[in-house]
Amino acid sequence: AQRVTQPEKLLSVFKGAPVELKCNYSYSGSPELFWYVQYSRQRLQLLLRHISRESIKGFTADLNKGETSFHLKKPFAQEEDSAMYYCALGTSYDKVIFGPGTSLSVIP
Amino acid sequence: ETGVTQTPRHLVMGMTNKKSLKCEQHLGHNAMYWYKQSAKKPLELMFVYSLEERVENNSVPSRFSPECPNSSHLFLHLHTLQPEDSALYLCASSQGLGSSNTGELFFGEGSRLTVL
């Protein structure tokens, strides 16, 4: 079965503290993993993808096929990082499945 | 207008009504999607169209009927809905299979549906 789980519904961290948003997936094929973000009153948008191995807004994510995880990390959280974060799995035939999301709140 | 646009932004309908949601993308993409976002459930994939052919129908009730007349337009026809169908319906597009950007979805702002 194809599935994405994000164990934390809500996550609060202080400004300047490290943040890690967890994501695990289940897929028998070769996965493509993404993180999407939705800021308040904005549309859902792509944050980063595992293929490009880039850092966006200080966030990075490493695909660990052994643990079937794709956790999102940032060493120093900023207030503007407060948003809803969704992990997503791309499978065959353009199908993209989303996890339930984690609401990140950065406390000043 | 650029990007993905959805109309109407808000819709209130009775259970016996027939209405349609419209999505239009101006990005030259080949794949289009309908997702349902409700308070109690995660973002649910409903339908995927790739090159105007439906490639995914995720066990959606027949009271939801998608239509993709061309690669730029996607409709969701609604008929005899239930109150539990009230949700935010999101449209998205992507370049599609074979492109290096598979999986990068561009979303509309959504159509907020309320079924009375």
Image: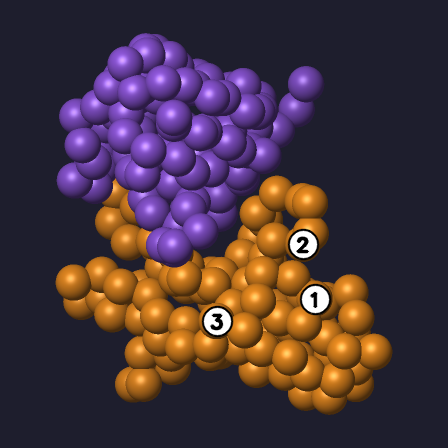
Chain colours: A orange, B purple
Residue at 37% from the left image edge and 13% from the top image edge: B19
Labelled disc at residue A9: 3
Chain bearing tag 3 is: A
Is disc 2 in the same subunit as disc 1?
A: yes
Question: How far apart are labels 3 and 2 at the CA level?
Answer: 16 Å
The image quadrant that residue A78 belongs to is: bottom right
Left/right of residue B61 with respect to residue B4 in the rendered view: left
Quadrant in which the N terminus of chain B appears = top right
Using the image, name the chain to which the residue with label 1 belongs: A
Residues at badges 3 and 1 in contact (C-beta under 8 Å)? no
Q: Which mark is residue A39?
A: 2
Q: Please determine if labels 3 and 1 lie on a single subunit.
A: yes
Residue nearer the viewer, A19 or B70: A19
Type of amino acid under label 3: Lys
Q: In the rendering, at what x and y percent does residue B25 appear?
A: 53, 23
The residue sitting at 18% across, 67% down in the picture is A28
Residue B5 versus residue B45 in the image, above or below: above
Furthest residue toward bottom = A17
Residue B34 at x, y percent in the picture: 37, 34
Q: Sequence-wise, which precedes: disc 3 or disc 1?
A: 3
